[in-house]
Image (tube, helix red, strand yellow):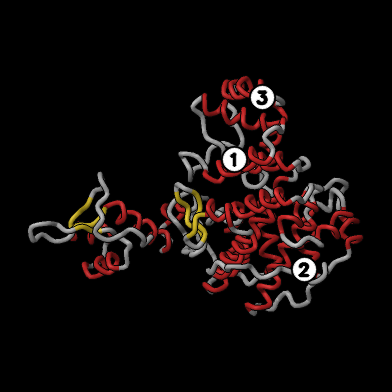
C-alpha cells in the first residue's frame, strides 16, 4: 500500500484538511503525520502557506482496516466478504493487470520463469537465477496401499486428499520446523503431489512420472498426457498462474492451520479440502460440464441465451476482483490457442467466450482459462483441477511459512445474532 504515495494527486480524488483527517480517524495530528510518512495516506501541499491535505479514500480505507483488526463487528464481518484486508502479507498483491508475486507480475513470470523458480520466490522472497533441483528422495508410501483406498477412476482431488495424509504418515520428521528441512520437504511434497494426481486414473503412471525432471513434466505424465517440450512449457505457465491469489478461501484455511502449528502436510490438506468446493477449485468441473452441454461452437450463443432466459449463471465467467476481465484467463486462453488451435473442445470454449462478450456479459475467469488449457493438452475429463491444486500448493506453503513467522493464532470473532 506504500507504493505511489506522497505528493501525487489523483484526478477526481477528494482531499481534506489535517483537522478533518485526524477527526475521521479519531487520532491526534501526530499519529496522522506518522501514517502519512509511512505512505499509508496520500497527502498534497495545501498551497499558499496552507497546511497539507489528505486523501479521504486512503483515510476511510485505513479506518476500515483498523476497525476490522480491533474487532468492530459489522466492519470485521464485511472484511471477510471481498472487503478490506484482514491480514498483512508480503506474498501476493491483486491488481487490474493480475496478481503480483513478491512485487513481480505473475503473467510476466509465467512467460519466462519456471514454476520451481516462482515457488522459491514465493517461499524466500528471492527469484533464483536457476532454481535448485527438486528431488522426491523416495516416495515414502506403498502405492498398493494407496490404490486399495482409491475408488476406481478417482479424480485428482480425491486422490490427493488421500495421498497427502499418507505421505505425512510416512514422514517421521514432519514436525521438524527448521527452515532448511522444511524447504526440502516442500519441494518433495509438490513433486509427489504432481506424480500422484493421476493415480486414481492409472497408478502405473506414478513411477514414470516420478522420473521426470520438473513439476510440469511430472504432472503431464501422471495425467496420461505427452510430456513434450511444448507441453511442458504450456503446463509450466498454467502452474505459475495457479501458484497464488492472495487470501482466497483455501489460502485462508491453510493459514488457520499453520497458525495452530499444524505440519506442512496438514496445511496442504486444509487447502485441498477447501479447493474441492464447487465455488473454488470445483468450478473447473462446472465449466467442463458447460462445455459438454454446448457441444459444438455453433450452439454456444443459444446456450448462453437460454441460460440467461432462465436466470442461470454461466460458470467460469466474472470475478469480483477483476471487473474488466481476469488477466490470468486471457493468458491461459492465448496459450491454449497457440498450443492446439484445431482442438474441437477448445474451439467450443472460445465460442462460449465470444457469445458472452457479444451479449455484454462477464468475461472469462481463471477457471475457464484452465479448462481451455486442459483441452489443448488433451487432459482427461475432471483432471484440470490437478493443475490448480499442484500449482496452488506453492502458494499454500508460502502462506504457511509466512503465518508461522507471524507467530499468532488466527482466531476471528463472531458477531452474535442469535436469541
Q: Nearer the viewer, mark 3 or mark 1?
A: 1
How far is disc 3 from disc 2 in space, using C-alphas?
43 Å
* In the depicted structure, whether residue 359 falls above or below residue 343: above
* In the depicted structure, whether residue 58 falls above or below residue 401: above
Mark 3 vs 1: CB contact within 8 A:
no
Q: Residue at x 60, y 32 (%)?
A: 314
SS at mark 1 in the image? helix
Q: Nearer the viewer, mark 2 or mark 1?
A: 1
- Badge 1 local density, few (<14 within 10 Å), some, or many (20+)? some
The residue where tag 3 is placed is 297
The residue where tag 1 is placed is 334
Q: Give the left or right position of residue 23, taking residue 156 as reference.
A: left
Among numbered discs 2 and 1, the one appearing first in the sequence: 2
Q: Residue at x 52, y 28 (%)?
A: 357
SS at mark 3 in the image? helix
How far is disc 2 from disc 1 in space, using C-alphas?
33 Å
Quadrant of the drawing holding the N terminus: bottom left
Of residue 83 and residue 188, the one placed in the foreground of this image is 188
The residue where tag 2 is placed is 136
Question: Splitting the image into 4 quarters, where does residue 23 fall?
Answer: bottom left
- Residue furthest to the front in view is 229
Q: Residue at x 69, y 38 (%)?
A: 340
Question: Splitting the image into 4 quarters, where does residue 368 fall?
Answer: top right
Q: Position of residue 186 (x, y in %)?
A: 68, 68
- Badge 3 local density, few (<14 within 10 Å), some, or many (20+)? some
SS at mark 2 in the image? loop
- Badge 2 local density, few (<14 within 10 Å), some, or many (20+)? some
Q: Give the left or right position of residue 190, taking residue 23 as reference.
A: right
Q: Position of residue 209 (x, y in %)?
A: 81, 58
Q: Give the left or right position of residue 245, taking residue 371 as reference.
A: left
Q: Residue at x 75, y 57 (%)?
A: 194
Amino acid at each position: 500500500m506504500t507504493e505511489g504515495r506522497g505528493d501525487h494527486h489523483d484526478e477526481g480524488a477528494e482531499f481534506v484538511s489535517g483537522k478533518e483527517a485526524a477527526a475521521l480517524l479519531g487520532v491526534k495530528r501526530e499519529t496522522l503525520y506518522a501514517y502519512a510518512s509511512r505512505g499509508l495516506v496520500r497527502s498534497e501541499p495545501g498551497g499558499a502557506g496552507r497546511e497539507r491535505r489528505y486523501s479521504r479514500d486512503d483515510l476511510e480505507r485505513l479506518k476500515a482496516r483498523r476497525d476490522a483488526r480491533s474487532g468492530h463487528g459489522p466492519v470485521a464481518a464485511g472484511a471477510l466478504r471481498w472487503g478490506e484486508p484482514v491480514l498483512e502479507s508480503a506474498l501476493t498483491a491483486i491488481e487490474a493487470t493480475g496478481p503480483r508475486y513478491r512485487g513481480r507480475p505473475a503473467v510476466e513470470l509465467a512467460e519466462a520463469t519456471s514454476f520451481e523458480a516462482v515457488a522459491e520466490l514465493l517461499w524466500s522472497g528471492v527469484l533464483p537465477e536457476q532454481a535448485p533441483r527438486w528431488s522426491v528422495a523416495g516416495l515414502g508410501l506403498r502405492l498398493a496401499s494407496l490404490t486399495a483406498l482409491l475408488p476406481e477412476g478417482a479424480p485428482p482431488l480425491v486422490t490427493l486428499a488421500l495421498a497427502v495424509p499418507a505421505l505425512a504418515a510416512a514422514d517421521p520428521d514432519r514436525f521438524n520446523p527448521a527452515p532448511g528441512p522444511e524447504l526440502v520437504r516442500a519441494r518433495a511434497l509438490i513433486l509427489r503431489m504432481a506424480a500422484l494426481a493421476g493415480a486414481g486414473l492409472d497408478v502405473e503412471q506414478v513411477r514414470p512420472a516420478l522420473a521426470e525432471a520438473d513439476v510440469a513434466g511430472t504432472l503431464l505424465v501422471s495425467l496420461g498426457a505427452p510430456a513434450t517440450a511444448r507441453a511442458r512449457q504450456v503446463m509450466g505457465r498454467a502452474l505459475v498462474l495457479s501458484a497464488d491469489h492472495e487470501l482466497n478461501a483455501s489460502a485462508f484455511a491453510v493459514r488457520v492451520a499453520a497458525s495452530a502449528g499444524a505440519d506442512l502436510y496438514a496445511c496442504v490438506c486444509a487447502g485441498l479440502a477447501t479447493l474441492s468446493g464447487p465455488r473454488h477449485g470445483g468450478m473447473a468441473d462446472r465449466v467442463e460440464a458447460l462445455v459438454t452441454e454446448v457441444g459444438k461452437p455453433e450452439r454456444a450463443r443459444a446456450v448462453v441465451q437460454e441460460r440467461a432466459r432462465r436466470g442461470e449463471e454461466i460458470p467460469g465467467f466474472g470475478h469480483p476482483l477483476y471487473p474488466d476481465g481476469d488477466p490470468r484467463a486471457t493468458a491461459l486462453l492465448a496459450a491454449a490457442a497457440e498450443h492446439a488451435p484445431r482442438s474441437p473442445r477448445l474451439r467450443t470454449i472460445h465460442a462460449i467466450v465470444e457469445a458472452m462478450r457479444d451479449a455484454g456479459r462477464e468475461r472469462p475467469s481463471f477457471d475457464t482459462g484452465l479448462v481451455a488449457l486442459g483441452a489443448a493438452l488433451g487432459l482427461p475429463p475432471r483432471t484440470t483441477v490437478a493443475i490448480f491444486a499442484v500449482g496452488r500448493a506453492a502458494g499454500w506453503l508460502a502462506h504457511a511459512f509466512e503465518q508461522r513467522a507471524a507467530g499468532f493464532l488466527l482466531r476471528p470473532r463472531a458477531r452474535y445474532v442469535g436469541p
